[in-house]
Image (cartoon, rainbow, N blue to C red):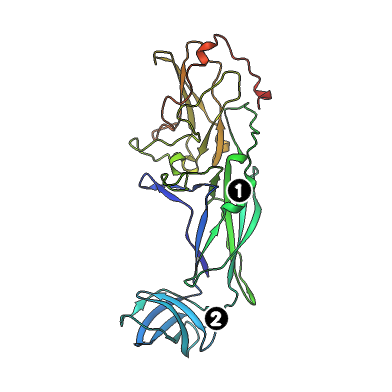
């Protein structure tokens, strides 16, 4: 049996209810798996060089075969010295192993290393299209180390489906952009000589996510995008999530295509996300504040977000943020986000045909 023991996710802001499953695709996106052929009831001291293992189920292999086991203080590799009994519901064997303790280990697992030659795990990596439906990206073959631990890196496959071409039409408030990220999942099975295991189930709900991004060494949450993920449960004292931008205050040029990218997180599902724009004059006074409901059909994707545009000539800066519409509200980004020294130079409507914008 093979199970996922560690997923590519991070707890954000120290809150167990805030878990980010969004990862930068230009780093490893790893699932750790643990091989456990059979579970153990116990491992007991027999002599200084032999321990007795009680196994749930039958024994695989024969005397002289190599096994790996883990039960309390008894962890290591040994060879089968004797098969006392093999049957159901449990079996008993003795294993050559230098014990460091006379205590009895309870529970644990055993891997029949010699009895399952050429053991590996086959993993399929799936993306999610706009339908939405799974599509296969590729297959990874991975072999465990001596403890039965193996790692599957999905990033190498996901990098093949991101791109750097701007296909956004700049004609709607928000829309998902598959070139900037998306959803994925995996399916896996065991294989060894003479045996092909069954595929694991694959969930249509419990998805994982990638972003066409890279992070710097020692950035918070490592390669996970947690600082960019909004949570409906977030406290007002927590750091605000960020737009996917290299700039704290990007410049908006009237008449030219402009959008902000953000993670429309799975963590805000069930809440209406609202964009706020607060226009400010040269003295930092408020000219107006407007709000716009986002299209929730692009949830669980990296989205492009457009500005209101056609600003009054008195507007010098525009503060832009997102928040949920309800009691559990939080701003999405810090204020003072969009540019200065450009908009006020034009004292008329900005004529842009969004259908032709690229």
The residue furthest top is 347
Disc on res. 159: 1
Q: Nearer the viewer, residue 325 or 1?
A: 1
- List x then y, in percent, for residue 144: 53, 68
Above or below for 263 versus 30? above
- Can I make out residue 58 in this image? no
- Left or right: where 149 falls relative to 97: right
**Percent of width and height locating residue 181:** 57, 42
Q: Residue at horizontal 56%, vertical 16%?
A: 310
In the displayed structure, would residue 5 be above or below residue 239? Answer: below
Report the side of 89 relative to 189 (left or right): left
Q: Mark 2 = which residue?
A: 114
The local secondary structure at tag 2 comes to: loop
Q: Which residue is at the front of the view, 249 or 122?
A: 249
* Secondary structure found at label 1: helix
Neighbor class of circle 2 (other Cα within 10 Å; few <14, some 14-19, many 20+) is some
């Amino acid at each position: 049996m093979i199970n996922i023991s560690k997923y590519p996710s991070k707890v954000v802001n120290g809150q167990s209810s805030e878990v980010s499953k969004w990862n930068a695709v230009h780093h490893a996106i790893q699932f750790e798996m643990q091989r456990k052929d059979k579970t153990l009831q116990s491992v007991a001291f027999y002599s200084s060089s032999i321990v007795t293992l009680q196994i749930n189920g039958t024994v695989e292999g024969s005397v002289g075969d190599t096994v790996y086991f883990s039960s309390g203080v008894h962890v290591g590799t040994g060879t089968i010295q004797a098969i006392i009994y093999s049957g159901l519901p449990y079996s008993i064997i003795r294993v050559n192993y230098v014990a460091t303790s006379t205590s009895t280990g309870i529970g644990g697992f055993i891997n029949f290393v010699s009895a399952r030659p050429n053991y590996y795990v086959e993993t399929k990596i799936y993306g999610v299209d706009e339908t939405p439906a799974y599509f296969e990206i590729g297959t990874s073959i991975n072999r465990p180390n001596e403890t039965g631990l193996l790692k599957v890196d999905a990033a190498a496959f996901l990098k093949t489906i991101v791109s750097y071409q701007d296909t956004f039409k700049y004609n709607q408030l928000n829309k998902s952009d598959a070139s900037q990220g998306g959803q994925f999942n995996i399916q896996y099975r065991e294989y060894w000589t003479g045996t092909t295991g069954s595929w694991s189930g694959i969930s249509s709900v419990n998805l994982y996510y990638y972003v066409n991004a890279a992070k710097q060494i020692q950035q918070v949450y490592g390669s996970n995008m947690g600082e960019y993920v909004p949570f409906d449960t977030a406290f007002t004292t927590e750091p605000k999530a960020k737009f996917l931008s290299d700039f704290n205050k990007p410049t908006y040029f009237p008449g030219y295509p402009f959008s902000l990218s953000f993670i429309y997180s799975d963590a805000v599902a069930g809440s209406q996300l609202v964009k706020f724009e607060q226009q400010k004059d040269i003295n930092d006074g408020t000219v107006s504040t407007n709000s716009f409901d986002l299209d929730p059909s692009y949830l669980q994707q990296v989205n492009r977000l457009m500005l209101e545009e056609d600003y009054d000539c008195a507007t010098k800066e525009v503060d832009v943020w997102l928040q949920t519409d309800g009691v559990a509200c939080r701003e999405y980004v810090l204020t003072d986000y969009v540019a200065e020294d450009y908009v006020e130079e034009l004292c008329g409507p900005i004529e842009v045909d969004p259908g032709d914008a690229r």
